[in-house]
Amino acid sequence: MAQETIKNTFDEGMALDKYERKYLKYLDNFKTNKMAVEVFEAFRTKDLSTIEDTMKNLARTTNIHLYLIGIGCLIIEREGLYKAAGSTSYLEYAQKRLFPELNMSDATLSDAKIIMETYIDNYKMLSKSGFKLEGNAHKLKFLTQALANHDEEEVLNRLNNDNFRGFSDWARRANVARLPEPEPKVDIEIKGNRVFVNGKNILNFPKGLPKKTKDWISADLGKTFAIRESGNEPYITETYSRGEQIAIENFKKKLRAKK
């Protein structure tokens, strides 16, 4: 019955109203899709609330597919399955194989993975707060940043009640009371092939080394010296996004707060 309804809508010679002429007639490939029939019927009502509700339902349906893709990406990374493709890291595998084969943008695929990773890693906390994935999933991209900048109770309250734009804007605003202590100032200077830290020549670059590489090394040295001068120990680890770096910073704060 649904297929017949949508077929009749597109029959040649049938009088089409404005919506049919301007939009729906172009969607022939959806003629036999049951969901499309329901969506088209909602669009024909020309009622804003009905159309909005339909679009929300569509968004949730699309997200379900993204959730599953995100979990697949997470499994490939955490279980090291990318090695079977001859890749040395998940990032290398994703760039060479996953992004092209799934025909999705890098950003969409990365978001799906980050969302599900954040959801799974914080499931206990989220479930206690009553968090529902549907309709709220994309807020999770900013959860680690929110926890780094604000108190957990307020983060969870806003996560569950704010809209996406409100939560993401608030999450990125640092709480002045929680700003970290400034690191000791370390003066790094490159003179030719020599690196000076606080006026002392501590490293000589080989001739011909690209300026970009010199800048990277100098920046890393400056960070290392600043950490040591603050009385702490530097530790280098690989991260694939700023979100993961924020998560590490947040874990450190929680760990130190318990001491």
Image: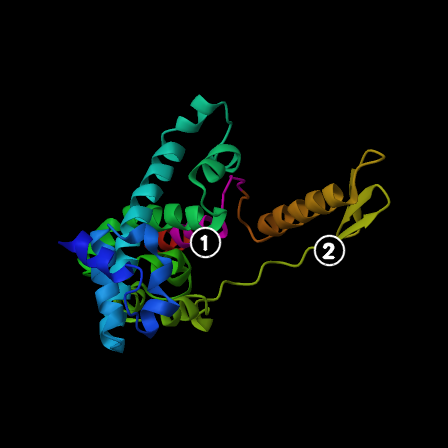
Q: Amino acid at mark 1?
A: Ile
Q: Quadrant of residue 54?
A: bottom left
Residue under numbered circle 1: 246
Of labels 1 and 2, earlier in sequence is: 2
Q: Which label is found at residue 187? A: 2
- Decide: few, some or many residues near mark 2? Use Cα within 10 Å; few <14, some 14-19, many ≥20: few
Q: Is residue 163 visible?
A: no
Residue 149 % position (x, y):
42, 64
Q: Quadrant of residue 55?
A: bottom left
From the viewer's perspective, tell me whether residue 214 is left or right of residue 230: right
- Alpha carbons under labels 1 and 2: distance apart: 26 Å
Q: Which residues are magenta?
A: 235-251
From the viewer's perspective, tell me whether residue 233 is left or right of residue 210: left
Colour convention of the picture: rainbow
Instruction: Identify the residue at the far front of this view.
Output: 13
The residue sitting at 30% across, 65% down in the picture is 159
Out of 156 and 60, give the one closest to the viewer: 60
Q: Is residue 247 magenta?
A: yes
Out of 246 and 43, give the one closest to the viewer: 43
Q: Is residue 250 visible?
A: yes
Q: Quadrant of the N terminus?
A: bottom left
- Find numbered disc 1 in the image and state the secondary structure of the residue it sits on: helix
Out of 252 and 155, give the one closest to the viewer: 155
The residue sitting at 43% across, 22% down in the picture is 84
